[in-house]
Image (spheres, rainbow, N blue to C red):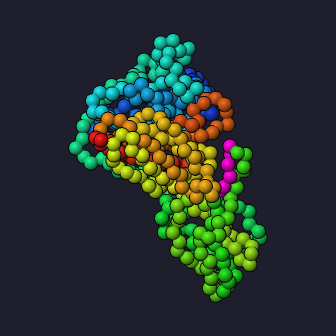
Amino acid sequence: MDDPRRLRGAHKIELQQDGETIDRAEIEITPWFELQEESVPLGGTFTFKGYGLGPNVVTNNYQVSWDNSTFGFMTGVMNRGTATAEIRAVGPPGKHTLEVWRNYRGIPYLQNNTQSPYGEVCGDRQSRWTVEVTDTEEDLAGCWMDEQFEEKPMELHYPELDAESDATLEVTPTSGQAGTQAFITGEQFPPNETVDLIWYRHEGHRVKGIPITPEAHRDVLPTVQTDANGRFQVEVEIPPEEGSTRPITAEVGGQEIAVTGFVVQPRIEKFTPHEGPVGSTIEIELSGVGWTMYENGPFLVYDNKPLGYACGTSGDDKGGVIKLDIPAAGEPGYHFIDIYPTIYEMQEDEPNFEIFPHLSYLDNHPVRPLPASHFVFEVTEE
């Protein structure tokens, strides 16, 4: 039998012999969660896992609260009912509460465990924990991003070419952050010919009704010359840019005849200052935030409390980099900013948890893995 950690609900089991069913049974899987640590130093993470999460509108998202502040959701739809979240251990040091809820509206239904027609969140299993955040003597100030993986461009995002050709373009590596050194190689081009390399950015504005389309930016990449065999190779530095697939075309004689792409991944461009009194303006800049729906709205959480989201759609006003500024808040000591992926938009009206931190992005974000970014700010005395 497969791993029993599967989607919530009824599952049928058949016993077959020689291709014939000789018996049937049905089992009901109830969602449950486990917390792998009870105590974590300040700034560390509690590993929180869910099993048997369901596919329907009521049981496919579970909200997580820290000290009665709901700051994100978990879903197991992309991973056969299993989900993983890393919950930041925020201060002050001491006892804190962690709880998981359920509701198709994307916010906790507070009668989950008392009067819900769907029963308790986890049946007779635990859904509320008391955890301890311990003090640390480490210098925590700074910022980092989650590990990112090698990716390949999506041809769906390429512009149409002007003419058919045997010419080919290739980029090595195929993905990376701004600042990555990449090699663009062309083959089977006309010999001893000038080739203009063209970088594309997706521009537009959904709210204003302006369609998002790939637009050429000719001042980003160099012009190259093919050799006698119709080949060239050039090294380029990937600029701070919007995320997802950035198309690259090759133009000869005014016609684009070959296309490839590079997946620009998120990078922290700016985080300043690292410390200051309450009210200090914290500036954050991110590149590599994509224009596609599933990656377009990263959500900022301050000390496990939701603040708001940003938008990765590009244009001349952003230049591929999103800029945020927020005030430092809280008692003197370390405070933690986490920027999580969201779903941003879904085909169905329900459930409704689109623009909210997706805590189980680690193993359940749709289409492709996206990283979160993390920042530590120290509030000082006046």
Relative side of 87 to 351, left or right: left
Whether residue 361 appears in this view of the structure is: no
Q: Nearer the viewer, residue 136 or 346?
A: 136
Query: Residue at coordinates 67% horizontally, 33% vertically from top-left?
Result: 348
Q: Is residue 73 above or below residue 125?
A: below
Query: Where is residue 30 shown, x and y percent of the image?
Result: 49, 23
- Residue most extreme to the left: 137
Q: What's drawn in magenta, residue-wise? A: 202-207
What is the chief secondary structure element of the magenta stretch? strand
Residue 204: in magenta span: yes
Query: Where is residue 22 shown, x and y percent of the image?
Result: 60, 25
Query: Where is residue 272 shown, x and y percent of the image?
Result: 40, 52
- The image quadrant where one finds the C terminus is top left
Query: Residue at coordinates 46% horizontally, 56% vertically from top-left?
Result: 269
Q: Nearer the viewer, residue 220 or 80?
A: 220
Could you tell me how many numbered marks the image carries? Answer: 0
Query: Where is residue 110 shown, x and y percent of the image?
Result: 49, 18
Residue 115: in magenta span: no
- Residue most extreme to the right: 163
